Image: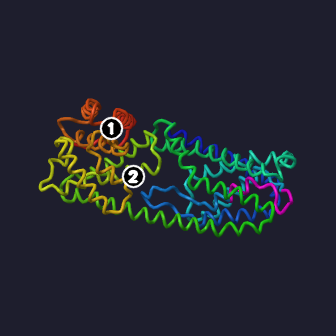
Amino acid sequence: MTPSAVRCVHALAGAVAVGALAWTAWRGVAQPRVALAYGMLIALGEAARRRPRSGGGLRETAPLGAAGTLAYALLGEVGGEPTSHGAPQVVAVVLGATLAGAVGRPPALDRLARRVIGAGFAAVCFQPLHASGVLGTWPAHSPYYALFLLLLLALTALCDAVIAAALARARAGGGAYGPALRRELRELPGVGSAIGATGAVMALAVAAAGLWALPVFCVPLLVTQLSVHRYEAARATRRQTVASLARTTEIAGYTPAGHARRVAALSRAVGRELGLSGAELTVLEYGALMHDVGQLSLPDPVPAGATEPLPPEERRRIARLGGAVVRRTGVPPEVVLVVERQADPYRDQPLTARIVRTVNAYDDLAADPACGPLRALERLRLATAYDHEPRVVEALATVLARGGPAPPGP
């Protein structure tokens, strides 16, 4: 998947948006009071949205706006009266409300394209069936109706995951599509499932109680959104602490400048290639940033900060000392495990520690003028019997061949 995939997704979203706007302008807005209510709900969600802090590891989220989008797409009745808006009007209202709520802070094009395509997909799956009267005979007014809505939500979530994986793969410069899709699917049971369930319940509540049900759902969703923002701030503060601690070895002269950042960036790329989830990638990045903290216990710096040529026992001792320091920073135990186990034989390590060890060894060897990047990879392949997992080495080679983070200079 190349950057052309991004252009294709944006073009598809643009075509859907233009078609929906033209259709709505030609036919007029059906039930404008209902459209205005949902438009205000979506705009409010977008206005309350905040961008994730740099490096926070969380996506841009607007749960209120997303839930309102799904609820409007799956709306068949308002207070017992059938609705008459169709799929084009759903897309037009969602697009207009999203842009109105984002005045002064335009949303990312990828997220806007996903919002438009997702709204169109859900509406096309539901509104024609509702307009034809199929849902009026079955499964309306039965327990199966809720199951039908949940099925449509699952299909919509799958559609969004397929598009998100394509965009993520293109933005990362290529790679296997399967791991990217699996990573997106693993993220669905979190906030995504809560948003989908809220959208379905909101549509059912409005069908029974009318538009007065919308404010009832706004308050808990806004509180949830505020909680997400606080969580983002806490994660950003933690990452700044980790990055500052990682720089101590450079400031003290124990490691070359930029070594920890290179290892962290390349480790994340290898982790994505191997299909790690977002949480696992965060653990991997933190462990890679702090993998050399144990060197501060050495009386004299290792030449060029390269621990790979050291005896195995010395490397394990440095790793254990680094783990003891990292444990006091309050990071998750998985990060401590990465630092403590990075010098062990790969069969005794978690996958994140295997990646950090292999990438760190590559960076150390590639920085040696007598070795260089190509011989560094060759030496890693020769050490796959005990030190480096073959799967990780090949993933590293794939990332480098695709133009991953550049090797350090001599």
In the rendered image, which quarter contains the C terminus? top left
Relative to residue 26, is residue 293 drawn left or right? Answer: left
Marks 2 and 1, the one that precedes in the sequence:
2
- Residue 395, quarter of the rendered image: top left
How many numbered callouts?
2
Q: Which amino acid type is marked by label 2?
A: Val
Residue 297 position, x and y percent, is 18, 57
* Position of 278 relative to 212 (above/below): above
Q: Which of the two marks, 2 or 1, is nearer to us in this view?
A: 1
Q: Which residues are magenta?
A: 68-82
In the picture, the disc for residue 347 is: 1
In the picture, the disc for residue 217 is: none
**69 falls in the magenta region:** yes
Alpha-carbon distance for marks 2 and 1? Answer: 19 Å
Q: Which residue is mark 2?
A: 283
Residue 73 position, x and y percent, is 73, 53
Relative to residue 147, is residue 288 drawn left or right? Answer: left
- The residue at the point 27 percent across, 49 percent down is 259
**347 falls in the magenta region:** no
- The residue at the point 15 percent across, 49 percent down is 302
* Position of 104 relative to 257 (above/below): below
- The residue at the point 33 percent across, 59 percent down is 242
Q: Which amino acid type is marked by label 1?
A: Arg
Residue 131 position, x and y percent, is 84, 48
